[in-house]
Image (cartoon, rainbow, N blue to C red):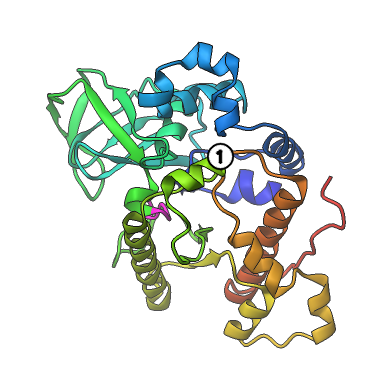
Amino acid sequence: MEAWSSRRCSATTGTDGPHPPRSGKKVYPTLRKTLIEKDLFSIPALLSPGSLLKHNLRLLNRRAHVLADRLETEWGVTGNLADLPAHPKWWINAASIHSGKNWRFSNGEMGDWKFGRHYSPGVSIAEAAAASAAVPYAIGALRLEIPQGGWYRTDPATRKPQQAIDPGVRVLRIWDGGAYDNLGLEALVKPGQPSTDYDFLICSDASGVLGPPSGGVIANLIRGNLATPRLFDLMGDQVRSLRSRILMREFDRGLIRGVIVRMGNSIRDIDLRAGVIRPEAEHSAYLSDELAKAAVAHPTALNKLSAQEFDLIARHGFECADATLAAHAGTEFDDRQRWPSSSK
């Protein structure tokens, strides 16, 4: 984990904010403790006396800003975009309501090809992460006050500046990156073109399976789960599916080397598709098919996880990634590993 993250990873992109690379041995216990002990955005946490006093009306019309504040105070996500490392390159993806395009934040750039780009963004990491995770209707868009100078029209293919421009607005509304591209691929994949930015691409798809209607937005929020209108879910699922197919086509054509790690697939699922024959007794060392489905079915929640829920999701992600890479990535990932008996 540490060798791959800190020395071999050249770029990373996502739609739920950044997770800068550090030693897995240091990050994992801290992450686990944070997610099982601290409610970030649950209704009880937001309606506590301290939160009501601090945020008051922002809870009604500026929830993305409340999320950014709580990312800093509750989860310790501090610093500005300029503090992100230059290597690997971190892209934090969002969607601009103004331009309708993929708005991206990084340590030396923010913007999109249609609106323009700015090369010294004075934005905090928490704000960028909150914009990236600003689920429509549940959290809502982040109002981003933008500088009035330093904007450039850029080449859509290369992102190189071409001409200084006047932004024409002072405030933009930046929404959930998943509304545009839930896999965060646009920053790294140009269909029909081989990449010069990386040698091997790992696309992590943790999207849940689109199931039957779950009771509506309000009912889900009361239960502590993020939810969007059904029509939005249908469109998002279709966009994810189309982008996955495009990426698989690039793999098949040999333009890009990589894999899609699709959560919800059990070890048995992955083996069957890859033509791997594994002794039946060996399957007992992995999560069962039922537990793999339960892990991916866990809703995107506003409240803290139980220790059992966190461990199930983490173990499934680990096993799914390990088996997928071993099956489809040649000899580079042949060193198979097992989930430790205790994650504490």
Residue 196 shows in the view: yes
Q: Residue at x 76, y 46 (%)?
A: 307
State the image coordinates of residue 207 (x, y, percent, origin top left): 50, 59
State the image coordinates of residue 291 (x, y, percent, origin top left): 70, 67
In the displayed structure, would residue 147 be above or below residue 118? Answer: above
State the image coordinates of residue 59 (x, y, percent, origin top left): 43, 24
Q: Which residue is mark 1?
A: 302
Q: Is residue 193 magenta?
A: no
Q: Nearer the viewer, residue 182 or 24?
A: 182
Q: Amino acid at mark 1?
A: Leu
In the displayed structure, would residue 240 be above or below residue 45? Answer: below
Q: Nearer the viewer, residue 118 or 297?
A: 297
Q: Residue at x 74, y 36 (%)?
A: 33
* Mark 1 element type: loop
Q: Residue at x 35, y 64 (%)?
A: 194
Residues in magenta? Answer: 182-188
What secondary structure is the magenta-colored segment mainly? Answer: loop
Q: Is residue 128 left or right of residue 146?
A: right
Q: Is residue 177 left or right of residue 42?
A: left
In the displayed structure, would residue 278 be above or below residue 143? Answer: below
Q: Nearer the viewer, residue 305 or 201?
A: 305
Q: Is residue 257 left or right of residue 9?
A: left
State the image coordinates of residue 229 (x, y, percent, origin top left): 36, 52
